[in-house]
Amino acid sequence: MILLDGKKVSERVLDDVKERVEHLDKKPFLNVILVGNNPASIIYVNNKRKAAEKIGIRTNIIEFPCDVDEKTLLDTIDELNKDNSVTGIMVQLPLPEHINKNNVIKSILPQKDVDGFHPENVGKMVLGLEPYFYPATPQGILMLLDEYKINPEGKHAVVIGRSNIVGKPMSQMLLNRNATVTVCHSYTPNLDEIIKTADILISAVGKKIVRCKMVKKNSVVIDVGIFRDANGKLTGDVDFDIVSSSCGFISPVPGGVGPMTIASLMYNASKVYC
Ligand code: NAP
């Protein structure tokens, strides 16, 4: 079994991005909007800021209280869209329930939508056109596969989870790479049987769902899930100890998809379109 070392690969990607930033005429300037005081969101935003600053990307975090109204957010994004010094805009999710997330996402200029969630960027990805940005987590997973020379073409890829940020874009991006893709979700019957047929298995659920020796021999297993177990330890969707004895490649949690997501986001943040 070969460990897909996201920590090591992400460091190489970040070195490349740093070098690319050094040679840019117009320097990237990432603006992150944070609403409320969700502890996980605060950690994610701080991690993004630290990663960006390490590679020479200037950042600005704009904080709002959790009762901010939607119009204030949209007006702020409008100003950032018009500000020529701003090259990237991100809104940390989740947003409070009174704010329509889709209105916020679609108000960001697609050329500054470093998360790749704007309908224009998603639509281009689906049509096989080049979007300004691909969503960070699936793009980071493809970077990891590429690094280990794992080509999805002609393979059966099974994606568990269909969220807009991971499962759906992941399945589309694998399809664009000529994989045969099966997407599973909470209504999928016979999940275990489908998992057994995967050459590439990508699990993005947030529950311990891939257990026992139920994966195909020599398959590639990518664990996107990250959550704390009953003892408070960070863990993923895959029972690593058991599954790693049957598969060919596996990404650990932590140290797999997590650091690749950050590196991929920084790759996006280094792109300057306006
Ligand atoms: P999400 O929006 O909650 O989506 C979870 C998906 O799992 C849904 O599509 C759901 O199906 C499906 N699901 C739930 N129970 C299932 C079951 N028993 N069998 C099959 N499918 C099931 O989550 P997300 O945002 O995609 O994130 C998924 C996990 O990845 C979380 O642990 C998150 O923390 C982690 N994550 C990690 C990174 C990273 O960088 N490492 C990045 C993003 C997310 P339905 O659609 O039918 O409800």
Image (tube, grey):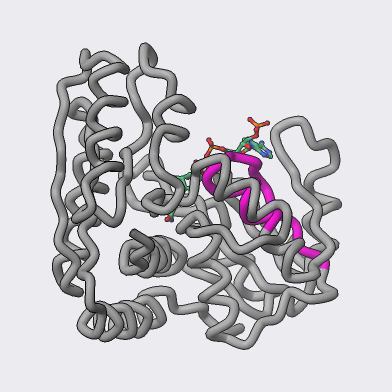
Q: Is residue 148 left or right of residue 254?
A: right
Percent x, y for residue 53? 14, 66
Which residues, given as a range, are shown in magenta? Answer: 156-172
Dividing the picture into quarters, in which one does residue 154 lie? bottom right
Residue 252 belongs to magenta span: no
The C terminus lies in quadrant: bottom left
| Along the viewing direction, whichever of 176 and 124 lies nearer the viewer | 124
In the picture shown, does residue 164 fall above or below 18?
A: above
Report the residue at 37% width, 76% height from top: 10
Percent x, y for residue 223? 55, 60
Percent x, y for residue 130? 60, 63
Percent x, y for residue 236? 48, 53
Q: Is residue 262 visible?
A: no
Report the residue at 42% width, 53% height from top: 111
In the picture shown, does residue 157 fall above or below 123?
A: below
Q: Is residue 133 left or right of residue 268?
A: right
Residue 163 belongs to magenta span: yes
In the picture shown, does residue 93 fall above or below 271?
A: above
